[in-house]
Image (tube, rainbow, N blue to C red):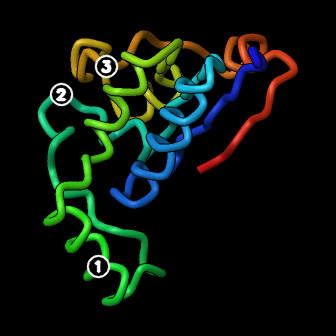
Amino acid sequence: MDETISIVLFSGTDDKLQAAATLAAGAAALGRPVKIFLQYWGLNVFRADGINADHGLAPEAGEAGKAAVAAAAKAGQATWIETLRMAKELGEVDIQACSASMDILKLKQSDLDPIVDGVEGVAAFYINAGEGQIIFI
């Protein structure tokens, strides 16, 4: 299996970041290349000075979701950033920041955590995604 999985990460809540990281790790473990394209709030959490902060949960998580996530963390579940770092160790995981989102958020690549491999535009993202699946989170 070598079809690329491309993830557009638009959301910046910890639950959605965990979902993206888990999908990336699973694909990498199966030997599939993974491309992650960071946009807006998904990009904003990759700031070097805030990557380990609490980014909250999506509103639909509610109190029950908050309790479940807290219990999983207490039980030792890896954080989304730990899972994403493991995914990069497992296989080919390339993380690119959207150039337009970088401009809107007034970010430079030096503002981002080193886990981000570079900056590219939408056209480059589509070219690099090839014929593989694109997942939007």
How crowded is the residue under tag 2: few (<14 C-alpha within 10 Å), some, or many (20+)? some
Q: Nearer the viewer, mark 3 or mark 2?
A: 3
Q: Nearer the viewer, residue 120 or 28?
A: 28
x, y (%) of residue 98? 53, 25
Q: Which mark is residue 115?
A: 3
The N terminus, quarter of image: top right
Where 50 falls versus 118 (above or below)? below
How many angstroms separate mark 1 from mark 2 (CA)?
25 Å
Q: Is residue 28 left or right of residue 63?
A: right
Q: CA distance from mark 3 to mark 1?
A: 27 Å
Q: Residue at x 26, y 22 (%)?
A: 112
Q: Looking at the image, which is closer to me, 81 or 119? A: 81
Up-down relation of residue 116 to residue 74 (above or below): above
The residue pinned by badge 2 equals 48
Residue topped by disc 1: 66
Three-letter code for the amino acid on which mark 1 is drawn:
Lys
Mark 3 and mark 2: Cα distance apart in space: 9 Å
Q: Residue at x 25, y 15 (%)?
A: 114
CB within 8 Å, label 3 to label 1: no
Three-letter code, disc 2: Ala
Dot 3 amino acid type: Ile
Q: Secondary structure at mark 2?
A: loop
Whichever of callouts 3 and 2 sits on the residue coming sooner in the sequence is 2
Q: Residue 45's x, y, as percent?
A: 30, 42
Residue 115 appears left or right of 104: left
Does residue 112 appear to the left or right of 3 in the view shown? left
39 versus 110 height, above or below? below
Tell me if mark 3 has few (under 14), some (14-19) or many (20+) residues whose alpha carbon lies within 10 angstroms of its own: some
**Is the residue 29 above or below the residue 73 in the image?**
above
Q: Quadrant of residue 74?
A: bottom left
Q: Residue at x 21, y 74 (%)?
A: 71
Q: Which of marks 2 and 1 precedes in the sequence?
A: 2
